[in-house]
Amino acid sequence: MDRPNIGLIGIVKDDLEADFWATLGRISNLGFAGVEVDARVFERLGLSPKAFAERLSGIDIELVAAHCTKYSYLDFGDDLIRQASEMDARHLCIAWGPTESAEQIAADAELYNKMGRRCRELGLVLTYHNHDHEFARIPDSRERYLEALMRQTDPQLLRLHLDIAWATFAGVDPLAYAELFSDRIAVLHMKDLQGLESGCEEACGERDKARFIEVGDGIVPCSEMARFAVKVGVEWLVVEQDRPADLSPWESVERSLSNLQSLLKSFEG
């Protein structure tokens, strides 16, 4: 089976803010096939969504996902979806959602089904990106919040943007969750951790103390996840590192890319 495409989010965000297009060119030259950006990045660049797509078409790089959060925009609806489509994004990613109660999850599931239907009409795929809090168990239930959200949404309307580091940080096995939702994974965020903090086994660790490291250099089962992606045909693996460790941002980007490319190459044949 073909290797997944490798994309990038974050890490060199300061350079993207300083010179977005030159930085995209450098990212492409390193060997990345795509990037993920904020859904309203076109506004910061002084462009319309369509003009943004036209500029992007001149660079050998794809827009893997446009990101939004449940709290980012007052218009969490049709305009946002239409603009993401006009940007030529492959996915509209809900990058953050609350897990306050079973009732709130049910309400969000209804909203995401509605959004996902509109996304399909415009050629987009709606995805949900996890952090660690979605792996906490619902009070008086053995079910985790993420499991409830997936159960109550249509697999054709909402897919999973699985962040394997935050799953690990929550004290769960990301490979087990990838296998559980294998038919719903659109993108894997490939990210690694140096270790875990107290409380992680209950999905209540101190998130601001998470210690990140380059992909393949830590405790997250990146090799197993990459092998899984090849096996089931996940289209995109996206490199991410929330906070720098010992390397500069560009050194980190290059090391993570090299490590991931080596892993994927080792599965050939």
Image (cartoon, grey):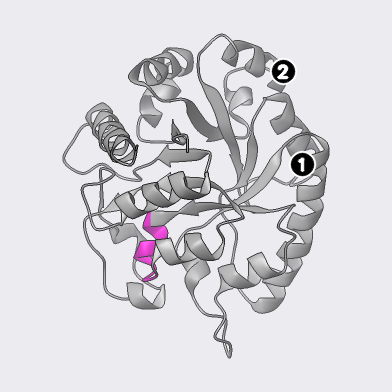
Badge nearest the viewer, 1 or 2: 1
Q: Which residue is more in the foreground, 240 or 208?
A: 240
Residue 177 spot, x, y in % from top left: 48, 65
Q: Please state which amino acid type lies under the numbered disc 1.
A: Cys
**Is most of the magenta stretch helix, strand or loop?**
helix
Q: Seen from this angle, which residue lies furthest left? A: 246
Q: Is residue 85 magenta?
A: no
Q: Which residue is more in the foreground, 8 or 249?
A: 8
Quadrant location, the C terminus: top left
Q: Residue at x 35, y 76 (%)?
A: 201
Local crowd size for mark 1, using a 10 Å CA cut-off: few (<14), some (14–19), many (≥20): many
Q: Secondary structure at mark 2?
A: helix
Q: Are marks 1 and 2 in contact (CB under 8 Å)?
A: no
Relative placement, left or right, of 242 versus 162 is left
Q: Residue at x 74, y 53 (%)?
A: 156
Q: Please state which amino acid type lies under the numbered disc 2.
A: Lys
Residue 85 spot, x, y in % from top left: 73, 30
Residue 67 spot, x, y in % from top left: 59, 40
* C-alpha distance separating marks 1 and 2: 17 Å
Residue tagged 1:
119
Q: Is residue 168 magenta?
A: yes
Q: Residue at x 83, y 38 (%)?
A: 121
147, above or below 65, in the image: below
Q: Which residue is more in the foreground, 260 or 170?
A: 260
Residue tagged 2:
50
Q: Which residues are magenta?
A: 165-172
Sooner in the amino-acid sequence: mark 1 or mark 2: 2
Q: Seen from this angle, which residue lies furthest front? A: 269
Residue 247 spot, x, y in % from top left: 18, 35
Local crowd size for mark 2, using a 10 Å CA cut-off: few (<14), some (14–19), many (≥20): some
